[in-house]
Amino acid sequence: MTIVEKILARATGNKSVKPGDVLEPAVDVAMSHENAALVINQFDEVFKGTGIEPKIWDPSKIAIIFDHRVPAESSKTATNQKKIRNFVKKFGITKFHDIRSDRGGICHQILAENGYVKPGDVVVGTDSHTTTHGAFGAFAFGIGATEMASVWSLGTVLNVEVPETIKVVVNGKLRDNVYPKDLILYIIGKLSAQGANFKVIEFHGEAIRNMPMSGRLVLSNMSVEAGATAGIIPGDEETELYLRVEGVHNTITPVLPDEDAKYCQVLEIDANAFEPQIACPHTVDNVKPISEVKDIKVDQIVIGSCTNGRLDDLEIAAEILKGKKVAEDTRMLIFPASWEIYKMAMHQGLLNTFTEAGAIIMNPGCGCCLGIHQGAIGDGEVALSTTNRNFKGRMGNPKGDVYLCSPAVAAMSAVTGFITAPTKGVN
């Protein structure tokens, strides 16, 4: 069996499962952000008129994190956040991360750095980039508000069809100045935006085994951009080390595929065969090597998000920007993925490097990425971003263009004012 088949077999009490089976797996972690307000509405509907007192199946397995609109940009958002706070208190939900500098941040980073996800877990979230947590060897995928209300009340996901699996093997070592972000853009370009629809991507190979957790999170995060239900990386020593550092003391048991596991497709990639990659407007699979993306003036640079807002991302960017200035006609925004990362970057002097260069440091959050809060672009403007989507209107304006890249490309481009390949950096 593949990893996802083994996880679903465990979660349903079956000895084995196969693609096409329809199951109701038990959930280990159920995550929502501010859209928990929608889930609460649906949850109330589940019990309406039944005479049964509403009850959460297991409050300790629900995580709610405010991140998409923080601080609240409108009275409507503030009222919804108040509603969620009251719900959390009423039902004793402990994995709650409010707008606080001592435990807040982007939901996918918060789940990671708090050790909420372990190998073999079934993780669901009302956010499409819940796939991020496949980096821990879990089956993690996005669901809707109605489905989540069902999970809150029952503890299982209804009608999950066992997906087929694509095996991606990345051999060798990435070139200098080529990063996990470049790798996943390259893979998405090969598979296309629909190439992994309703499938799981399983990542293997030397380059994956030698990749730190921060890079693995990038790969799993953006697997959904190839249409994948999930992107899973087998648990190993790196997985256990990361979770131990984050305070996990329980037994950690990686779920590995069988040697004779059946895959619907195998894609082999030479990690040394490509240069930095750029996803051009308006689809993530419109990927080109940076050498083919020339003379494009950039109005706004964004470094951050659940994809590339981690400490090593900021370190890479700061090394390039140290002693330099952001181009005169270019704006640069930095969004650390969590307050923990923000504070580490501050103590290391990275934030000072950014501000000396002319960048603006923003609070951790998702607003700029999806264009609803902070950092929108103007008509005809171009943004170059380390985020995960470049759809029309993604950064708040359908009349603007968004290009995607690695933190190294973003930092170098901030200095020149044009999309530019990095000339130095650290892998």
Image: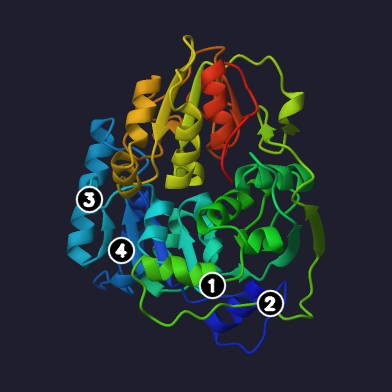
| Residue 203: image location, x then y, percent | 68, 62
Of the numbered discs 2 and 4, the one sitting upstream in the chain is 4
Of the numbered discs 2 and 3, the one sitting upstream in the chain is 3
Q: Where does label 4 land, which residue?
A: 48
Of the numbered discs 1 and 3, the one sitting upstream in the chain is 3
Mark 2 or mark 4, whichever is nearer to me: 2
Amino acid type for the residue under numbered disc 3: Asp
Q: Where does label 1 land, which residue?
A: 237
Q: Residues within 10 Å of mark 2 (few under 14, many from 20)?
A: some
Q: Closer to the camera, 158 or 221?
A: 221
Mark 2 or mark 1, whichever is nearer to me: 1
Q: Quadrant of residue 335?
A: top left
Is there a contact, CB below 8 Å, between mark 2 and mark 4? no
In the rendered image, is residue 318 in sight?
yes
Cα separation, mark 4 vs mark 1, equals 48 Å
Measuring 60% from the left and 87% from the top, which residue is drawn there? 14
Q: Where does label 2 land, which residue?
A: 257
Cα separation, mark 3 vs mark 4, equals 37 Å
Q: Residues within 10 Å of mark 3 (few under 14, many from 20)?
A: few
Amino acid type for the residue under numbered disc 1: Glu
Taking the view exactly as shown, the residue that stands out farthest to the top is 329
In the rendered image, is residue 393 in sight?
no
Q: Secondary structure at mark 3?
A: loop
Cα separation, mark 2 vs mark 3, equals 38 Å
